[in-house]
Image (cartoon, rainbow, N blue to C red):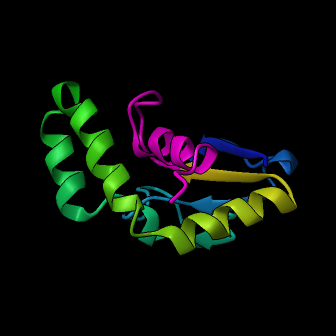
Amino acid sequence: MTIYTKRIYEEVSEKDGKRILVDRLWPRGIKKENAHIDVWLKEITPSNDLRKWYHQDIEHRWDEFRLKYKAELEQQQAHLEQLRQWGQQGPVTLLTAVKNEDHNHLTVLLEVLNHPVSS
């Protein structure tokens, strides 16, 4: 499974493969016709409440955010499975507008995609 992450503001590359936007809000300054996305998968992003809560104190809420977002992702098994299938068919690039490359929802999403919990 080949899944990359990238800021949507970065240049489009042939290596990107299927480009999937995984932000709840449309990125500022990007026109939809210029975004070069194949899918906008809002459903797999953190809920509005969780996103707002986290952004109030990103520095101190990272660990708790990870746990809460993982709990939300447990309810998104169909979308997670779809992402895994796309990743098995070819390269996939998950796109986001977030600036913090280390502490964002994509790092949690990748962790869940790469290490599914078996029931």
Residues 45 and 28: in front is: 45
At which x and y percent is residue 66?
Answer: 32, 40
Above/below status of 24 relative to 57 = below
Residues 55 and 76: in front is: 76
Task: Find residue 63 and report its image quarter.
Answer: top left
Q: Is residue 75 left or right of residue 90?
A: left
At which x and y percent is residue 33?
Answer: 63, 72
Taking the magenta stretch, the answer to whether it contains residue 98 is yes
Q: Is residue 89 left or right of residue 45?
A: right
Residues 52 and 50: in front is: 50
Magenta highlight range: 96-119
Q: Is residue 16 left or right of residue 43?
A: right
- Residue 34 showing in the rendered view: no
Q: Identify the residue at image location x=56%, y=44%.
A: 110
At which x and y percent is residue 19?
Answer: 69, 60
Q: Identify the residue at image location x=65%, y=70%.
A: 82
Task: Find residue 55 and report its image quarter.
Answer: top left
- Residue 118 showing in the rendered view: yes
Q: Identify the residue at image location x=42%, y=42%.
A: 98
Taking the magenta stretch, the answer to whether it contains residue 86 is no
- Number of numbered discs on residues: 0
At which x and y percent is residue 8?
Answer: 57, 49
Q: Identify the residue at image location x=86%, y=62%.
A: 89
